[in-house]
């Protein structure tokens, strides 16, 4: 092989290796930044939950008019999206991802219990959906179910979705599975403590299967109709 041709091959290899290493470095930096962002968001949510719990204790028998419904649902929805992204980049078996998912699950349960307390105290009427999924390749419909639930939460602020990785090795998940008798097949949904339902359910099916969701959809449709028929000055 001529010396010039050999040099071209070496140069091409060096350039290709440099591009690969640079891309890998940038990808790792982005993933690390995303993990740090998740941790910061979790810290904020944890603080918000602690503040809400303290606020509830301080209220005692006072009127609930001075307390608005928690906005943690939106923040936790944002955190769930970030966790999903990071899991996709780092892998579902990454130790950091697993640790973050455990912390997120704990925050979800705390918010779920706090919501129950505020419902009893203040008469709130949220629609709570417990969503059990798997990312182990044994639930082809879980991703689509997640999209449906995200859209429902965006449509109706009263809907609070709590998602739990069925296979996560965590005592909180074990307790939730036992309490609601979750056995499969996944996805599994529990709406307002009703009996669990299994398998993929589209938006219309979910709404029609739940009186609470049906009432929300009916109220939203009526409000939209009134908005279009109300004359403007």
Image: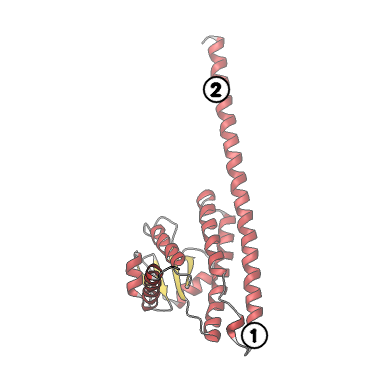
Q: Residue 71 in the image: state x and y as whole percent.
A: 56, 70
Task: Tell me the element at label 1.
Answer: helix
- Whether residue 50 is visible, yes or no, is yes
Position of residue 135 relative to residue 220, above or below, is: above
Position of residue 44 relative to residue 1, above or below, is: below
Task: Tell me the element at label 2.
Answer: helix
Question: Which numbered disc flags the more N-terminal residue, 1 or 2?
Answer: 2
Residue shown at the point (59%, 65%) measured from the top left: 103
Rendering colour mode: secondary structure
Q: CB of mark 1 within 8 Å of CB of mark 2?
A: no
* Residue farthest toward the front in the current orientation of the protein: 233
Crowding at dot 1, Cα within 10 Å, few <14 / some 14-19 / many 20+, comes out as few
| Separation (CA) of disc 1 from disc 2 | 70 Å
Instruction: Quadrant for the C terminus, please.
Output: bottom left
* Residue farthest toward the top in the current orientation of the protein: 2
Position of residue 14 relative to residue 146, above or below, is: above
Q: Quadrant of residue 4?
A: top right
- Whether residue 199 is visible, yes or no, is no
Position of residue 89 relative to residue 232, above or below, is: above
Query: Residue 17 versus residue 226: which sits nearer the camera?
Result: 226
Query: Residue 36 versus residue 184: which sits nearer the camera?
Result: 36
Label of residue 12 in the image:
2
Q: Which residue is mark 1?
A: 59
* Residue farthest toward the bottom in the current orientation of the protein: 61
Residue shown at the point (40%, 72%) measured from the top left: 223
Q: Residue 70 in the image: state x and y as whole percent.
A: 57, 73
Q: Residue 231 in the image: state x and y as whole percent.
A: 40, 69
């Amino acid at each position: 092989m001529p010396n010039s041709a050999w040099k071209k091959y070496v140069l091409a290899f060096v350039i290709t290796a440099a591009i690969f290493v640079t891309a890998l470095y940038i990808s790792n930096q982005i993933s690390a930044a995303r993990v740090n962002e998740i941790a910061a968001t979790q810290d904020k949510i944890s603080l918000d939950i602690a503040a809400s719990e303290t606020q509830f204790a301080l209220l005692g028998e006072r009127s609930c008019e001075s307390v608005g419904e928690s906005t943690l649902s939106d923040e936790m929805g944002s955190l769930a999206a970030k966790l999903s992204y990071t899991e996709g980049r780092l892998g579902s078996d990454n130790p950091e991802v697993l640790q973050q998912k455990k912390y997120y699950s704990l925050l979800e349960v705390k918010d779920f219990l706090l919501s129950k307390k505020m419902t009893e105290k203040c008469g709130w009427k949220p629609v709570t959906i417990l969503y059990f999924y798997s990312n182990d390749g044994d639930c082809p419909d879980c991703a689509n179910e997640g999209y449906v639930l995200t859209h429902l939460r965006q449509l109706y602020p009263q809907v609070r979705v709590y998602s739990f990785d069925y296979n996560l090795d965590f005592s909180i998940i074990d307790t939730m599975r036992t309490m609601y008798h979750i056995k499969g097949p996944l996805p599994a949904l529990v709406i307002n403590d009703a009996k669990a339902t299994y398998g993929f359910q589209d938006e219309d099916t979910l709404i029609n299967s739940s009186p609470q969701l049906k009432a929300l959809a009916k109220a939203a449709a009526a409000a939209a109709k009134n908005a279009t028929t109300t004359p403007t000055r």
